[in-house]
Image (cartoon, helix red, strand yellow):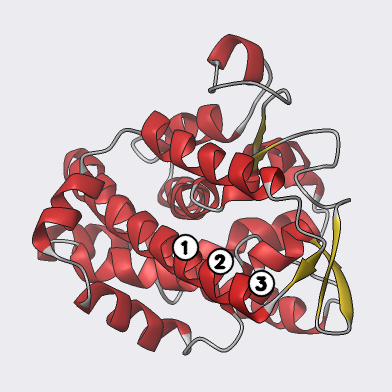
Amino acid sequence: MKYLMLVALLWPGLALAWGEKGHRTVAQIAWASLTPQVKSQVGDLLQAKGFTSLAEAAVWPDLVREMKLDAYAHTGPWHYVNLPRGAQSYDAKRDCSRPCIVSALAQNLAAMHKGELAERAEALAFVVHLVGDLHQPLHVSFADDKGGNEYKVTIGQEEVNLHYYWDVLVLKGTPAADKLAASLGAGVKQQERLMWQVASVNQWLGESYRITRGIYASAPKHITSARLREDKQLALQRLIQAGLRLGYLLNQQIRVVK
């Protein structure tokens, strides 16, 4: 597993959804909210695959995809769902007729309960990762510009695509993932925590889609400092929501894994 992490450092142009910091932050927030019994079972699964932490498992699905490993070639569509321009909401028959992030999450939740420990650990890694992706707005987006990958914006003197801006640049200047997770977790009110945790997957998706529609409605071409501050606050909220929801989900799911 250390080999994969080294590749991530050396692989030129490697781009991870939410960035490595975002995914690690989500995983660390979730880890902090797990019960002792669930932490023990999750730890056994992580060890079976050679993951040193839930945060390391969180970035693994992007690494194997970017390395173009044949065994994981089918997982590319798992990271997103595209809706038609003008659609008001997600429709499973229309938008997920082939594998998409929604069906992939359900598939991997089921896979955590069967097979060898290493296979279940891979399913866990995908669950952790996909919950994070579902909260990155541009993973619930549009096919015609590849989820913002072909939409260009400038930030400072740099031209980047909109997807990369939301994956990585919007979190630039925030603390390291462990400190960010602790800070975000400490700032949540109990009422917010409970409200966010009980939301359904379709609600998560709907939240991201509403944000995405708002992003495109404003038609950003240049990211001002004021726009960056607003987007950063929104991104941080999505990270804490994802982490708390992931922890709640694992506490519900892992307890029945034998």
Marking on residue 231: 2
- Could you tell whether 15 is left or right of 51 in the image? right
Residue at point 80%, 53% (across, down): 69
Q: Amino acid at mark 3?
A: Val
Residue at point 18%, 56% (across, down): 193
Task: Name the image quarter holding residue 141.
Answer: top right
Q: Amino acid at mark 2?
A: Asp
Residue at point 27%, 38% (across, down): 199
- Could you tell whether 199 is left or right of 47 in the image? left
Residue 51 appears in the picture as rendered: no
Residue 162 appears in the picture as rendered: yes
Task: Name the image quarter holding residue 115.
Answer: top left
Q: Position of residue 22 (x, y in %)?
A: 52, 70
The crowding category of the residue bearing disc 2, from other C-alpha atoms within 10 Å (few below 14, some 14 to 19, many at least 20), is some
CB-based contact (under 8 Å), mark 2 and mark 1: yes
Marking on residue 91: none
Which residue is tagged 1?
A: 234
In what element is the residue under mark 3? loop
Which residue is tagged 3?
A: 168
Instruction: State which quarter of the image contains the N terminus.
Output: bottom right
Instruction: State which quarter of the image contains the C terminus.
Output: top left
Q: Amino acid at mark 1?
A: Leu
Residue 207 in the image: above or below residue 179: above
Residue 209 in the image: above or below residue 175: above
The crowding category of the residue bearing disc 3, from other C-alpha atoms within 10 Å (few below 14, some 14 to 19, many at least 20), is some
